Amino acid sequence: MNHDGRPPEGFAPAGRTSLWAARVRLALRSSRETWRAFAANPIGVVGVAIILIFGLMAVAHPLLMATLWDPTTYDPVTGFGFDEISHPAPPSWRHLLGTDPLGRDILSQLTASTTSAFVLGLVAALVTVGIATMVGALAAYYGGVVDAFFMRLADLIIILPTISLLIVLTALLGLNLFQLALVLGVLGGFGGTAVVIKSQALSIKVKPYIEAAQLAGGGPWHIILVHIVPNLLPLSLLYMMFTVTGAIFSEAVLSFFGILHIRMSWGIMIHTASTGGYLLGGASYWWLIVPAGAAITLLCSSFYLVGRALDEVVNPRLRGR
Amino acid sequence: MHRPDMDPASPAAAVPLVQVQSLRKLFPVGGGMFRRARRFVHAVDDVSFTLQRGESFGLVGESGCGKTTLGKLLVKLQPPTSGQVRVAKISPGAIPAEQALGWWDLARLKGKELKSFRRQVQMVLQDPYESMNPRRTIYDTVAEPLAVQHLGDVCERLDRVSQMLELVRLTPVASYLFRYPHELSGGQRQRVAIARALAMEPSFLVADEPTSMLDVSSRTAIMNLMLEVGQRLGLSYLYITHDLAVARYMCQRVAVMYLGKLVEVAETEELLRNPQHPYTRALLSAVPVPDPAHRRQVEVLRGDPSRPVDPLPRCRFYDRCPLAVDHCRDTPPPPLEAKGTDGHLVACYRV
C-alpha cells in the first residue's frame, strides 16, 4: 500500500516499540496536566490527603497487630482489655481511644474497619460505574427500545427505597460485605447514574466524529468502545467518587441496624454503643461514638471533595472559575 | 501514482461511477414514540444525476437546501426514504476506462459489503473542529479506517499514516503524529480530515464544504491540495459548496440545488456563462465583482426560501420566481430536462 515508496522525511523507520513509547509519553503528559489542573483546587487536595490518611490507617492495622498489639487484648472483635477496672473505659495510654462496652479497643476497631470501608466503597463504585457507563452508552447509541427499556428500569430502581430494600435483602439472604457492594453497585449502575451518563452519551453520539467513525467502516462496538466510552470516562470517574460516599453510608446504616454479616465496621461500633444504651448518656461516653462517626463523615466527605474537584477538571463550564 | 491517461474530458473517462435515481429523503417534523409524524421536511426531493469516473462534480446551493443530506445519502451515512443510489465497484488502482466489477446498491449494503464499500467511498465532513475525537491523536484518527478494516499491521499503518500526512503537507510528519486535534489549527485539522478520508485510497470522495469553516488564507491551499491529490489518485469528487467561485475552481460540472431539488445541471463554464434557471441567474448576479465601475443588473428575488416542510406540489421556486405564471403554480414541479446545448439540464417550464 505504497504511494511512491519514499519514506517520510524526519521520520525514523519506526515500529511497534516507538509507537508504544509515544503512547506512554502521551499518557504521562496528559496525566501530569490533569494532576496540575486538579491540584490547583485546594478542595481536591484536602480530599486526597484525607483519603491517604485513611489508607495509612488501613495499612497500619495488620502491622500493629503483628508487632505492638497483643491479639488477646487488642483484637477488634475477640480482644478484652484485662487491665481496665470497668468497661467502657475512657482513653488511656494503653487504649488510646478507650474501650467499648465489651472491653475491646476502639482504636483497633477503628483501624480494622477502614479496610472494609475502602473495599466496600471501591467495589460498589467500580460496579456502578462499569454498569452505568455501558448501559448509558448502549441506550444512547441504539435508542428506541433499548433506550426505553434501560431508562424505565432506571426509573423503577430510582423509586425503590434503597435502605428498606437492603434491609429486606439482608434479612432474606444474609449479605456479607462483598455481596452488599455488588448489590449497591448494581442498584446504582442501573439506576440514577445510568441516566446521567446516558444524557452525556447522547451529546457525544451526535458529534461528527461518530459519523467519521461510521465512514471508516466501524461497527457499533467500535464506536461505543473507542469513541463514546472514552469520552464518558471523566464523567464516570466523577460519579464513581460520589458512589463511594453512598456505599459507605449505606453500610453504616445497615450495620447500625445490626443486620450485616460483617466482622467489624464503623457502623457496628456505633451499633454496639447504641444497643448498650450509651448513646443516651450524652457526651460522657464520647469515645464510643465520635471516632466511628467522624471516620464515616470524613471518609465520605473526602471522596465527595475529590469528586467536586474532579468535576471542575472534567467539566469545562466550571473550569477556571 | 500520476495517471496521464486520466484526462476527465476525454471520452474514455465518461464511465458512470455514481448513479442516483429519484432519490428522496424526508425528515419527520415532531412526532414521537406514540404519535406518528404527519409533517415532513423534504430535504432531498426526487433527485437524479450521474457522476462520471474521474469527474469533479459540484453541488451548489444556499444553506438548508439539502446539499449535506444528499452527500450523506451518497455515502450511506443516512438511509434514503426512497430512490436508488448505485456506485460502481472499482478495484483500487484501476484505470478509468476499465470496466467496473459491478455495482453497489446502497439500499442493500450491510455487513461485510458495507465495510468494503466504505473503502471505496469516503467523505470529508464539514466541520474540522468537531469531526475528530478529542481524545485520540492524529495518528489514531488517520489510522482509524485502516485499523477498523484490518489493513496492515501496526508498523504498516504507521508508515501509511506518515505517507498520508506527507501527502497533505503536514510536515515534518513526526511532529504531527502524536498531537491531539486541539493542538492544531483549523486548516491543519482539515488536512488531517482529508488524510483520513484518503488513507484507504477511495475512488469517490464526497467533500462537504471542506473550506467553509476555514479562513480565506487557508482555503486556496486546501482546494489546491484536493485538486492535486485528486489528480494523483484518480479521485472523483462530489464537491458540496455554497460558493460559486469555489465550484468554478474545483469542478467540471455543477448542479444547482434549491429546496431539495436540482434545478440546473451543466458544465461549470457553460453554467456560469449561460445560466438558464431563474434561481441560478439570481445566484450568479449576486456574486461580487471586484470592479467598482461595474454596474450589474440585479435579478431581484422576493422574500426568503420557503420552509421545505410539506411543500405544495408545484415548482419550489414559484413564490420567488420573476418568471412565474399560473402554469407553474398549478402543475407539479418541472422535471430536469435537457435545454439547449448538450448536457445542459434545467428544471423550469419557462425556459
Image (cartoon, coloured by chain):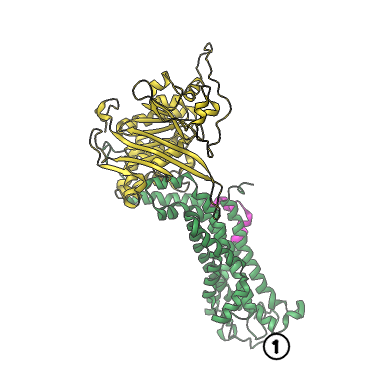
Chain colours: A green, B yellow
In which quadrant of the rendered view does residue B92 lie?
top left
Q: Main secondary structure of the magenta part?
A: helix
Question: Image point 32% across, 39% down: which residue?
Answer: B163
For the residue pair A11 and B115, the one nearer the viewer reads as B115
Q: Horizontal and vertical percent for residue B51?
A: 34, 33
Above or below residue B325? Residue A206 is below
For the residue pair A174 and B40, the one nearer the viewer reads as B40
> Which residue lies under the disc numbered 1?
A86
Magenta-colored span:
A33-48
State the quadrant of the C terminus of chain B.
Answer: top left
Answer whether residue B278 is visible to the viewer in this image: yes
Q: Horizontal and vertical percent for residue A233?
A: 50, 56
Above or below residue B197? Residue A205 is below
For the residue pair A95 and B222, the one nearer the viewer reads as B222
Above or below residue B28? Residue B237 is above
Q: Horizontal and vertical percent for residue A237?
A: 54, 58
Answer whether residue A63 is visible to the viewer in this image: no
Amino acid type of disc 1?
Ser
Above or below residue B269? Residue B211 is below
For the residue pair A220 and B218, the one nearer the viewer reads as A220
Circle 1 packing at 10 Å, graded few (<14), some (14-19), many (20+), is few
**Residue at the farthest top position:** B293
